[in-house]
Image (cartoon, helix red, strand yellow):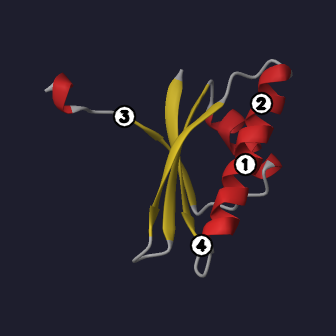
Amino acid sequence: MATFVAIRSLPGITPDALAGAGARVKSCAAGMQSEGTEVRWLRSFFLPASSQTHCYFEGPSLGAVRELNERAGLPFEQLLEVAEMTPAQV
């Protein structure tokens, strides 16, 4: 499976709203999995200085990750495939 990032600008988002967005994407991912699409929300990082979030997903395609975000009602500015690199790999 490939890994993808959704980059979002969420100016003025509250901690409660951020948690609610996480709950929605988690629930929608479970729904898609029960329908046979193996897509997962891996983690998100919130950058308070820029009001931006980077949300990481694993899925079979960009389209599946796009559908997950659309079902959850989460806007994004960019949705990109990523290549992971860790200290252990270099």
Do labels 4 and 1 touch, CB within 8 Å? no
Query: Element at badge 4?
Result: loop
Residue under circle 3?
83
On the image, the x and y values in percent for residue 15 come to 60, 68
Whichever of labels 4 and 3 marks the residue nearer the N terminus, that label is 4
Residue under circle 2?
30
Whichever of labels 4 and 2 marks the residue nearer the N terminus, that label is 4
- What's the residue type where badge 3 is placed? Ala
Quarter containing the N terminus: top right
Identify whether 73 is placed above or below 63. Answer: below
Whichever of labels 1 and 3 marks the residue nearer the N terminus, that label is 1
Quarter of the figure with residue 13: bottom right
Of residues 62 and 13, the one nearer the viewer is 13
Whichever of labels 1 and 2 marks the residue nearer the N terminus, that label is 1
Query: Which of pointers 1 and 3 indicates the residue nearer the eye?
Result: 1
Of residues 30 and 81, the one nearer the viewer is 30
Query: Element at badge 3?
Result: loop
Residue at x 70%, y 57% (from the top left corner): 21
